[in-house]
Amino acid sequence: MTPLVTLCSSGLEAMVAPELGGKTLSVRNRSSGHELLFQRIGVQPTARSEFGDWAFGWDDCWPSVAAGGPGYPDHGALWSQSARISEKSESRLTLETVPRDRSWYYAKTWTLIEDTIEVSVSVENLSTLPLPSFWTLHALIRLEDDMQLVFPSGDSRKTVSGNDFSPRSFPSWGTASKFWVPGPVERGFCRVDYPTLGMAYRLQWNPAELPFLGYWATNGGFRGERNAAWEPSDGYYDSIQTAGDNGCLPILAPGGAKTLTLRMTWKRK
């Protein structure tokens, strides 16, 4: 059994697994009882050598999303690492990760305030070489037939895999699609409304830190599962190769560091 850390505020309860790269397994609204994250019922997370069945809950993808050779595994390098707790209280948790070769440092803090999780991430290049890398949120959320998306730039989107569909409707059964808002977003905000549940999921971030936004949805098209994800990122998009070709690949200089923050809200409408 993987040890879990439970965080609580007046509005939320979250469960985090430090030994699994800081995977967040659950974000539950305490007043409604509704779970935000997609969960694979009956699956006990364990350390794995491939992402595979790992795709549930909330992971951070860094230094990339897609695999790209040594140092760039599928869905990033964090999920396969064990993180160390450096700070813990009822509503706040900080984890630190350093790989065996000590080439980089990654720290993440969750702070629960009422119905919101404030997230702070710090990354540092400890090596003597430049480090091409970008950060992407990978929080798989529950999918409901009547969920409604609010893009930060109207309905503007670039389909990079799967079939296009209107964000005012829902993908047909048996499909899976990935979109990106083309180019930098002007406003760091997006939302999913769940009318039947009476709930809303909101993300807010600084577009100067995370200028790009992806969106993933599968309605049975990937392993028969139903989930979706907003994916703010500072690279455009997914792989080191594609981001480099697009001229949107951040590079951490030796000894360089960066920080980013975002706010995740799960509340009654």
Image (cartoon, grey):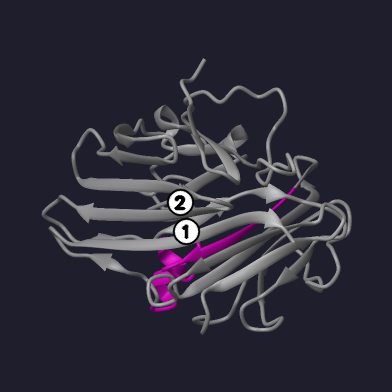
> The magenta stretch spans which residues?
227-247
CA neighbours of label 2 inside 10 A, class few (<14), some (14 to 19), many (20+): many
Please name the residue shown 14% across and 51% down the image. Answer: 127
**Which label belongs to residue 136?**
1
Q: Position of residue 94 (x, y in %)?
A: 34, 41
Image position, residue 188 (x, y; %)? 51, 74
Q: Nearer the viewer, residue 136 or 176?
A: 136
Element type where label 2 sits in the image: strand
Mark earlier in primary sequence (1, 2): 2
Tags 1 and 2 in contact by the CB under 8 Å rule? Answer: yes
Percent of width and height locating residue 136? 47, 58
Label 1 sits on what residue type? Thr
Q: Amino acid at mark 2?
A: Cys
User: Is residue 240 part of the magenta span, yes or no?
Assistant: yes
Q: Is residue 257 above or below residue 109?
A: below
Residue sitting at the far front: 10
Residue 249 falls left or right of residue 116: left
Residue 6, percent across and down? 50, 31
Q: Mark 1 to mark 2: distance in Å?
A: 5 Å
Residue 82: image quadrant is top left
* Residue name at image x 50 percent, y 56 percent: 137
Circle 2 residue: 61
Q: Residues within 10 Å of mark 1 (few under 14, many from 20)?
A: many
Judging from the image, what secondary structure is the residue with disc 1 in? strand
Q: Nearer the viewer, residue 146 or 254?
A: 146
Residue 148 vs 109, above or below: the answer is: below
Is 207 magenta? The answer is no
